[in-house]
Amino acid sequence: MTYRLNPLVAAVDAPPIPIAQGWKARCDGRLGPMIDLSQAVPGHAPPDILLQRLGEAAARPEASRYGPIVGDLALREALATETSSLYGGKVGVANIAITAGCNQAFYIAIQALARNGDAVILPSPWYFNHQMTLAMLGVEVIPLPCDPEAGFLPDPDATEKLIDSRVKAIVLVSPNNPSGAVAPPDLIARFHELAKRRGVALLLDETYRDFLPAGQSRAHDLFADPDWDEALIQLYSFSKAYAIPGHRLGSMIAAPRLISEAEKILDNLQICPARPAQSALARSIDDTRDWREGVRRELAARADACRDALVQAPGWRLASIGAYFAFVAHPLTGPDASRAAERLAAECGVLGLPGSYFGPNLDGYIRLAFANVAGEVLGGLDDRLNALTR
């Protein structure tokens, strides 16, 4: 090969999920079938009414044509109504872009905000796709280590000390991937105030907001602030909330000026969300509220099953849990710590992801994505975990 690759892309590690999936081949199955807790995928089918409407929409000729660059108007209107109701504020169609998944929304937001040589503050543990996007765009990652004793919640005061003229955004993911930590409304408000005061963007990724544990508020009042769009950019995933990841639907809510800049990027990329899914969702947000609440309750029960199993596994400690994820401290130390997840898959038939995939100095943790595994399967997790240290 005589041509040269982009060194920024070449320097990024290979995608973590396929690497972890390769560990399955080393498992002999003596403890039972593989329990795959590696990927955050819905473990349930979409609601019947949505499946029906997806089929109907796909059969219409207009669904095969190009649509508006920032998404079909009907879905943008439905999301504006839903967001305004949920958060008690005012969000309009001009504030919304529909994207081909939440990862695309993050990519577009970063490209609109930052250029090569700029910086973004990323709390650690972080979602590895966020770090990969920043690295490939030449935007420096400024890590913000989160204290395990504080439930891996980021500290606004520590964040402010990291802000300089190069910083264009602060990223906040709640509920968090990988830790599951849920930022309470007052903490989100403090970050919003900090972002406004320092002239940077608060990039609030709420992919998993519909799966909050019972008793935890799924709404903050940032959108009630008439000046909310001075600093806030909110990201959301229809793919996770409605169990349709194959359709890759997400959204970005921001100031109209940023949406206009995003439109340029989306027009250039020509990677648009599927129109049948947009049409089906626009008609289904209201009709699926009970279904989504049922999913939330089921995932809370799975979190409880995961929590109970860890209590029965000496040496293992639940560091944080919420929505889709448990971030678990494992008992291995020394050189084995960095390959604990690989050993867990090969020797015990449990596939999780090592903490090192999510930031520096996290070798002592494993992420377990429990949302796609039934509660009765999670109930036997303690026997598998204990087998690693026997």
Image (tube, helix red, strand yellow):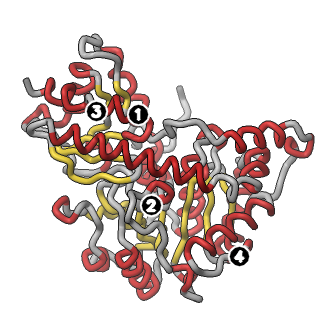
Q: Secondary structure at mark 2?
A: loop
Q: Nearer the viewer, mark 4 or mark 1?
A: 1
Look at mark 2 in the image and give the residue it sits on: 139
Q: Nearer the viewer, residue 91 or 130?
A: 91
Q: Name the mark on residue 379.
A: 3
Query: Residue at position x 57%, y 54% from top?
Result: 237
Which image quarter: residue 158? bottom left
Query: Looking at the picture, which amino acid does disc 1 mark?
Result: Val
Residue with the mark numbered 4: 92
Is 145 placed above or below 45 here?
below
Residue at (9, 27) in percent of width and height: 389
Indicate which disc, 3 or 4, sits on the residue closer to the N terminus. 4
Residue 171: % across, % down: 42, 65
Lateral position of residue 343 relative to residue 6, left or right: left
Left or right, residue 201 beside residue 122: right
How far apart marks 1 and 3 lie (CA) works out to: 10 Å
